[in-house]
Amino acid sequence: MSGNHVLKFFAVANFFKENPKQLERGENAYTSGHVKSMQLRKEVQPASLKGTVLASMKKTIYTVEVSIDLKEQAILSATCTCPRGQALCHHIAALLYYTHYNVSSTDVEQKWTIKAGSSSEIVKVIEELYGCGENKFMAMSGDISTEKIEEFKKNLGQTNVVGFSWLLKSNPEKPVPRFLTNIDEILLSEGYLSSEDKSTYLMAKCAVSEEEVQEIVAATIGQHSNENWLIARKYRITASRFGLVLNACRRGCFPPSLFKALMEGYSLDRVRAVQWGKDNEQTAIQKFRQKPTLK
């Protein structure tokens, strides 16, 4: 596409100046091919831009509508059918990216829809793509130093672009505070195993004072990024498990699957509320700071 863009990028950047993270995610969505259709009507004032964009999990398609003053190069308003769409979301940014890079300032209506992929693609085997392994390829020349490996591990932990990157983290430098009760140690202790009333013994060991509660709060700041938080919540009935316990109590039925769910470790990354919180954390902090009575 030539430089004669119908929508200048400075207009897009100015519209997202308070939400740079959504603009960055929108660029990733655009380059990943998540924009599925686009229609720009310039004969109306302001110009009407409408399109469809895939959700991050590629199972849902959201509709985006944008009003643009092309003469002044100003985006007036934008909405999306996603849960965040009444504010600024990355689906809006993705459609604006596509419009900037693929639409020139002609006088005809612009409309585009993705074409179905060709089914006649030739499938190649691994040997054809990469050879038979005779040439021992090395991506780097020379040995890799320990410092380079540690730097690479640190960068992976910051971006979290690789699943299970938490396995690369080093052991915590600071010892675990003793007021954080380690349930595993209690269950394997001689006192618990020899106790006649194990429930009472366990409850007594898990009891915390108000002062200890405040210490635990201070020691677990950061939640999932803090190793102490993982220890403090292990085998606890957390908010994400309340529903299972309450439903079992109402029915008066406590199947083995309930205890298995409570005892096993689990990831919160697929919980929508948790993912929503991570994606919108910076926006929430910004809105909070805008309230003069809450600073």
Image (tube, grey):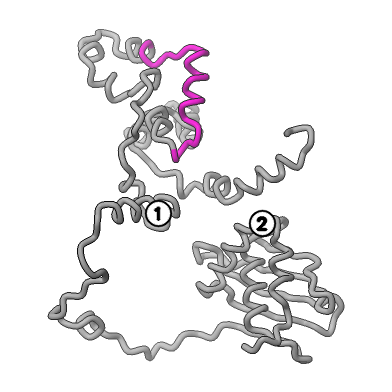
Q: Is residue 37 left or right of residue 107?
A: left
Mark 2 residue element: loop
The residue beneath circle 1 is: 155
Secondary structure found at label 1: helix
Magenta span covers which residues? 204-225
Q: Between marks 2 and 1, how big is the CA–CA gap?
A: 24 Å
Q: Quadrant of residue 142?
A: bottom left
In the current view of this chain or complex, which residue is farthest to the left? Answer: 134
- Residue at (52, 13) in percent of width and height: 210
* Outermost residue, right side: 45
| Amino acid type, mark 1 | Asn
The question of residue 208 being in magenta is answered with: yes
Q: Residue at x 49, y 29 (%)?
A: 246
Residue in the image at 70% along x and 69% along y = 12
| Label ID, residue 19 | 2
Quarter-of-image position of residue 284: top right
Camera-nearest residue between 135 and 127: 135
In the rendered image, the quadrant that contains the C terminus is top right
| N-term mark: 2 or 1 | 2
Residue plotted at (36% across, 19% down) = 178
